Image (cartoon, rainbow, N blue to C red):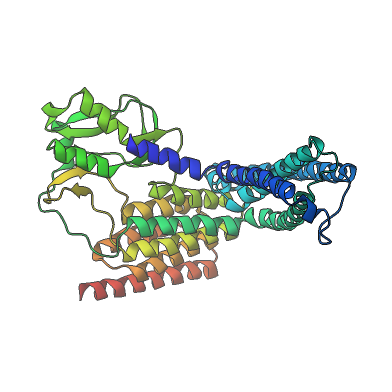
Amino acid sequence: MRMKLFYLLFRMLSGFWFLPGVIILGTVLAAFAAVQVDALGQSFFSTAPWLLQLSPEGARALLSTIAGSTITIASLVFSLTLVTLTIASSQLGPRLLMNFMQDKPTQIVLGAFLGAFCYTLLVLQAVDTSSDPHFVPQFSISLALLITAVNLGILIYFIHHVADSIQADTVIAQVALGLTNAIEEAFSEIEPPEPADLPEPDALRHHGAPVCSNAMGYIQAIDFGALLKLATEHNLIILLPMRAGHFVAAGEALAYLSPAHLLDDALQVRINDQIVIGGKRTMAQDLEFSVHALVDIGLRALSPGINDPHTANSVIDYLSGALTIAARRYAPLPVYCDAEGQARIIVNPTGFAGLVASAFDEIRQAATGQLAVQIQLVKGATRIARALTRRAQCPVIAKQVTALKQGADVEALQPCDAADLDEVITEFETVLSRRLETLAA
């Protein structure tokens, strides 16, 4: 239950409406405060030369104009946002909608204009309903003009931001940054100690009691800390064959519990409470989500309708750059142990091999006949090969280049093109061979 509450809080804080709502609330409070300041300092503000000195009619006309223009611009901001989302969905892939929904500048701009509208209406109400016909909140009106001037600058920035945010290179860089941060969080710089007695997952699956899902959807987050505490308290071993990003049907086994006879309805409910299931994949614990988002951009760029190999090459550059970080670090262990070192939770984490397969397989398969993209794939593999830190990683990246070499129709290429492909493959094999010699030393 705690995990679901934390995840709900995370979704709320990263949602599209939260930041604009906070800004609107702040401007509403500012309007009430400014009117109170005007009421307390009426004699001072009515003679201050640095403030606008307006009659009640002039104040109402000015505030009405500001309110009308502000809400018009706010509708324009909404329209531009919807256009951006439509373009992102059709050209770059639906997985990237979440990135645009979480875009802070867009949220700030929406909040600024809607907040200015609410502020102006509240100040206008103070002018209209004042018991003193000579009371005009001069300070509040001057502040409304200042807010309007600031919003004009924000609007100019927003137009620039929208034009920049829908460019493929900008989107690729943003998604790659999220992938890099996720890899740095999941993969450790220090080699974790291997547990002494690691139970076999197949044995746990065969002899353990299945814990069935009470919902259908994608696993969005798992509270491993709560599950570890639960397993320790009841002296259990829990196998989690699925991870965040996997789809589970209602009634399908989420976990396997050993000893099997300890499973009861209460334990089944408590284990289900620590696993958040929703209608879509998220980036919370799903390391492959950002990889698939980048791959989607590359696949759409290689489609016959778009045929943009340069965008696909940019995707390959960023994917290989992110994978070099994973190559230098240590993948998460497939086990969580208690304080005494006893294995309690057996998991199925995303390792280096899984990341490489997710990043390369689909693009390599779609790049058949695209020589420039195939050459870029080999160059990306060479970049990763230079960063390898363990011999077990070498066959993983070599497999991709071997598959590409076997799938390339060399006979259909011009001799110069075939020579270019052979040159980068030879460079990869040389780098990998030297890397193997270094790691063996």
Horizontal arrangement in the rendering, residue 431 relative to residue 108 (left or right): left
Residue 431 lies, with reference to residue 289, above or below; the image says: below
Q: Residue at x 49, y 49 (%)?
A: 293
Q: Residue at x 39, y 69 (%)?
A: 428
Whether residue 157 is visible, yes or no, is yes
Residue 236 lies, with reference to residue 30, above or below; the image says: above
Whether residue 409 is visible, yes or no, is no
**Image position, residue 409 (x, y; %):** 48, 57
Quarter holding residue 181? bottom left
Residue 264 lies, with reference to residue 40, above or below; the image says: above
Quarter holding residue 263? top left
Q: Residue at x 25, y 39 (%)?
A: 240
**Image position, residue 268 (x, y; %):** 24, 27
Horizontal arrangement in the rendering, residue 298 relative to residue 198 (left or right): right
Q: Residue at x 17, y 59 (%)?
A: 193
Give the farthest residue toward the front: 43
Horizontal arrangement in the rendering, residue 420 relative to residue 441 (left or right): right
Quarter holding residue 380? bottom left
**Image position, residue 36 (x, y; %):** 69, 46
| Tally of marks | 0
Tell me the quadrant of the picture where the C terminus can be found.
bottom left
Tell me the quadrant of the picture where the N terminus can be found.
top left
**Image position, residue 284 (x, y; %):** 41, 46
